[in-house]
Amino acid sequence: MTAVENRSAFYKNPNVAGFDDVPYEEKERLIGLVKADMRFPDYLYGCYECGICVAACPSARFYDFSPRRIAQAAARDDVELMYQQMQEDVWECSQCFSCVRCPRGNNPGGIITVLREVAVNAGLASAREALEGYSRIIYKIMSTGTQVSPDMLQPDAFPDWGPEVKDVSDNLDMWRRALPPETLHTTSTGWDVDERTLLELYLIWFHTGALDMIQEVDEGLHMILQEVMEERLEDAGIEV
Amino acid sequence: MPIPVEALLKKKEHFDRGPHDPRSEDFHHELFELEEQGEWIVSRVPEPFVPVETKYGVTKKIPKAHLWHHKSCGQCGHIPGYSTSIFWVMRKLGYDYNDPRDQTSCTAWNYYASATSNAAAQAAVAIRNFAAAYETGYFPLIHCGTSYGHYKEVREELLHHRELRAQVREIMDKLNKPMVMPEEIVHYSEWFYAMRHEIAALQVRDFSGIAATVHPACHYYKLVEGDAIYDPDVYGGQRTAVVTGVAEALGAEVRNYSTWFDCCGFGFRHILVQRDFTRSFATLRKIERMKEEADPDVVLTHDTGCVTTLDKSQFAAMAHGRNVGVPVMSEAQFAALAMGAHPYKVCQLHWHSADYRPLLEKMGIDWEAAWAEFQQDLKRLESGEKQYLTWDDVG
């Protein structure tokens, strides 16, 4: 009997969210990375199990999700449960940080940020799955320095936002030119970002390893981003 | 529904603001200590400023002028009347500002959505933007609630982790940029709160018949909670005073509702790739509760994601016959309208989804005439008479 089966009563899904199981040592290694993050001690002080965080949590109302379970698993150093959460629960969190109402000063949302980061770094299946369909946003923010752009407002992408989306899309160029701030006449970025500013951002992605993180979850996107950034940096005579 | 402020104040657990509360520790001591040690430059809040009180009693300086506008991705991209209104109000009040191109997103929307970044990268992005502001001589004013909350988190991390400061310094050296941390991290809604009486003094439209509900933005007052504005005269100091303070100064009636603490449902990744959650939460827990308990003419909030979520989520819910249908905007747009701003040329309400026209009528604005004026301006652009509209064109 594997460790997972032994402890299945604690899990929502004994097969760890439907993904292939990994040896305990690998889970221990990943959770070790979570606990080694400099922020982790500031996010966890123990848990009263009072449930205030759950009452405040929007995701708990719509998913089988509980910030209390996150804090408890971390406080108990429960490697199996933390791994299972890393493979499933963490992507349900809204990152609103309502859970910091915690009377012990815990930050379950912060623990989740770190769990997610380790999941992305390790290229876990859950991270790849959660970020499917999100690639274009990563491309946008990392390559242009703005997260969303006016030209993303297309009726097929946002059919649930009403007919106004089509109005925006149909009149985009004109409506942007009608904006009085000079920096907002753009359609493919939120505002006009200087070339030098963008290059500085690229250097941050390179030097902090943020760009490399993409490789683990989306190799194709990583390749494109690297090529775009290197080319522009090279044109400016900057070596990485 | 009145807020039971008296009952709350009598509770045994209630806190008193002031130096005897351990949570009132002032981060400025460490901030300036690190400057003395040569770790960074602290960019000072320029004069004149308005001192305001934060949650646990620490005074915060809100600069009036000479501000470097750290713009917001979602505001600029999808609800540009938000940013435009902030600029417009500042211009009308006669305070100078800088609208920079040397600014990137804080990139926190992506970080909270996908975690495809790390603490060092996030801190470096923040410091790069602060350094860019410092180089211009202007002081940063943060438009987005998430940028503001994230930058406060970054400040906390940098204050307490020497190794992170070293890592970021190394990157700034590569960029030839100084390590800069502002004396205060200031959200635009704090500026509006601090300036609310000056704004009200220029009010030209009567809002006494307007009922509003306020959604306080999570990342404004939940992240680094001590550094958010509270005022004993607003909600008895039990909730953040920004937005509500402005609406009340403009004569609107702010109505209470039970789910005020709930988030809007934005979810960062959910709004982009899992909107079933966002739509459900925004309408079932926020808009329907407000409609049922307070029946507002308008929902006011102070963050990019909240305006987007609460506004855009209503269309699908309406198709299901839910009790929705209330306009949503920032208090910046609301204040601009009070000061006589054009609903389309300045507030850009045609980018919003929920029907705002009944609200405009209640404010005494002829929206049909206003739309016709805007169309005339577009014709000038179409004909080539002008390439862009300017501040002179919008009044």
Image (tube, helix red, strand yellow):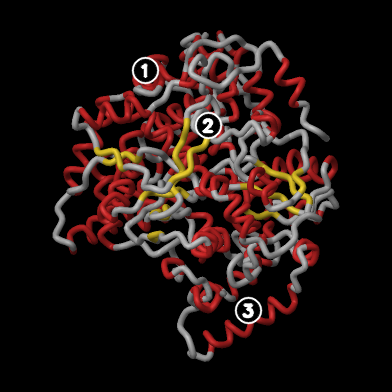
Residue that badge 2 annotates = B54
Q: Nearer the viewer, mark 2 or mark 1?
A: 2
Nearest the viewer among B61 and A190 is B61
**Screen quadrant of the C terminus of chain B:** bottom right
Q: Chain of mark 2?
A: B
Nearest the viewer among A215 and B228 is B228
The image shows residue B154 at horizontal and vertical percentages of 38, 34
Amino acid type shown at disc 1 = Gly
Residue that badge 1 annotates = A32
The answer to whether one can see residue A165 in this image is no
Nearest the viewer among B37 and B10 is B10
Say whether mark 1 and mark 2 are on the same chain: no
Q: Is residue A216 left or right of residue A158?
A: left
Could you give the CA–CA distance between mark 1 and mark 3, rounded to whole angstroms?
59 Å
Q: Chain of mark 3?
A: B
Amino acid type shown at disc 3 = Phe
The answer to whether one can see residue B311 in this image is yes
Q: Chain of mark 1?
A: A
Could you give the CA–CA distance between mark 2 and mark 3, rounded to whole angstroms?
41 Å
Point 34% across, 19% down: residue:
A36
The residue tagged with tag 1: helix, strand or loop? Answer: helix
The image shows residue B334 at horizontal and vertical percentages of 65, 57
Q: Nearer the viewer, mark 1 or mark 3?
A: 3
The residue tagged with tag 2: helix, strand or loop? Answer: loop
The residue tagged with tag 3: helix, strand or loop? Answer: helix
Amino acid type shown at disc 2 = Thr
Residue that badge 3 annotates = B374
Residue B360 image-quadrant placement: bottom right
> From the viewer's perspective, is residue B79 above or below residue A42?
below
